Amino acid sequence: MKTTQLNEVHRAAGAKLVDFAGWEMPLHYGSQLEEHRTVRTDAGMFDTSHMLAIDVQGEDAREFLIYAFANNIERLADTGKALYSCMLAEDGGVIDDLIVYFLGDEFYRVIVNAGTADGDLAWLEALRVKKGAEVTLNPRRDLAMIAVQGPNAREKTFTALPELRAYAADIGVFFGVQVGDTFVARTGYTGEDGFELLVPGNTAASVWNKLAAAGVRPCGLGSRDTLRLEAGMNLYGQDMDVKVTPLESGLAWTVDLKSPRDFVGKAALASKPATRHSVGLVLPPKGGVLRAHMVVHTPAGDGEITSGTFSPTLDRSIALARVPVAVKVGDTVQVAIRDKKVDAKVVKPPFARNGKALV
Amino acid sequence: MNIPDNLLFAASHEWAKVESDGSVTVGISDFAQEQLGELVFLEVPEVGRELAVAESCAVVESVKAASDVYAPISGKVIAANTELLDNLGQVNTDPYGAWLFKLQPANKDDLKALMTADKYKASFA
């Protein structure tokens, strides 16, 4: 199994380690539920070094990514601004979802998922060759990534790493800035404020320990998953993959079909309207737990839960489900849980953000 | 791992305690709760239900997954701990105090098929 630069630190902290996409990663450090609540109320940190930063540089970088990504990077006018996007196959299937940072006229940084990283690189390289684009694709495995999240995350980051404050205190949401050898981005995957830090791998342990000393709680991928689901964010491989389009995955807002620009997958998306869409489901308190792959019965036909969990913030179960487009917010549907059919309410995600329940 | 000497155990990691009145109290073992992780939901059987040996009769759900609980012996459910749903953490912190249900055994010989604490300990060796 692959390990991140922080593996020894996790072991020393007593983390329960699991295989995630071929990487040995912390699931939790004792209590997933407490880690979750700490991020909603204070500050927690996640080792996300299994994800990959790919630097795309060269005179054609902009044109190349305009064509490669479903969201339109032409919208990135200010240096440091980030954009969430899908990268699609020709048939509109989602190869990966990613965040791209605009770092200069010929310099973009793309953060992709761990399990898809090698495939993404191969796909982008093939696209580069096909387009004859003057770009280099540089996978930054030398960098470690730490996500510090929660209402107190930014302040505690500055306590731990005071040299960042002067440069990163005023950056807006979804912006990144390079400060010395640390890339600081005001992004995350929890529905809370905070930073994602990219640091040289050999300093990762030192940065992690400074953050811990400043009162940032180490959190595992278990709470990362419940936090992102409460925040209504998709997980690649679960809520979408290469077999479905972004329009069927709650990501229509990230696909730009209006502008004249062409991009990979555009023709396919434009030619086949979605018959299913992604919605949120909520159970009553103590109503059981929704899980991925459970069947959702609706008058318009069956659907399926793509991610389900117990929500610590709402104290009930929540899920994302792919259902026929006729199913609307406010409807009641039935979910098959073992031998029972349980009523679930259809809602519009997010379920919780910034410490508050939203449904 | 905590394995009290006064309990019997099923291979599916339920514990059974023979009470002085002959009834049998059932829960899940320390090993089982450790494997599951923090509990977020459970279902206990209805009082009056007749259970066969190894019949699926309760569900414990953690942050990770749902897991069936099986009847360690045959018998009739004479009590179910419905209050545990408001105190799920007890299953993790005190698995031998957090009982799920009580049975009136249908066949005392069923108990002989369960493991003693020593045998259960040895099963992890």
Image (spheres, coloured by chain):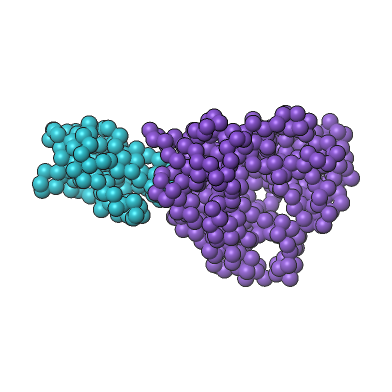
Chain colours: A purple, B cyan
Q: Residue at x 57, y 44 (%)?
A: A329
Residue A221: x and y in percent read 54, 49
Instruction: Name, please, the residue furthest toward the left.
Output: B21
Residue A352: x and y in percent read 55, 55
* Residue A267 visible in this rendered orientation of the protein: yes
Instruction: Name, please, the residue furthest toward the right.
Output: A59
Residue A354: quadrant of the picture: bottom right
- Return the residue nearer the eye: A333 or A292: A333
* Residue A23 visible in this rendered orientation of the protein: no
Residue A137: x and y in percent read 78, 42
Quadrant of the drawing holding the N terminus of chain A: top right
Residue B123 drawn above or below residue A142? above
Q: Residue at x 74, y 58 (%)?
A: A175
Is B103 positioned to the left or the right of A1 in the image?
left
Is A32 positioned to the left or the right of A185 in the image?
left
- Return the residue nearer the eye: A172 or A178: A172
Residue A273: x and y in percent read 70, 31
Is A194 positioned to the left or the right of A339 in the image?
right
Q: Residue at x 23, y 49 (%)?
A: B4
Q: Residue at x 72, y 29 (%)?
A: A272
Residue A212 drawn above or below residue B21? below
Number of marks = 0
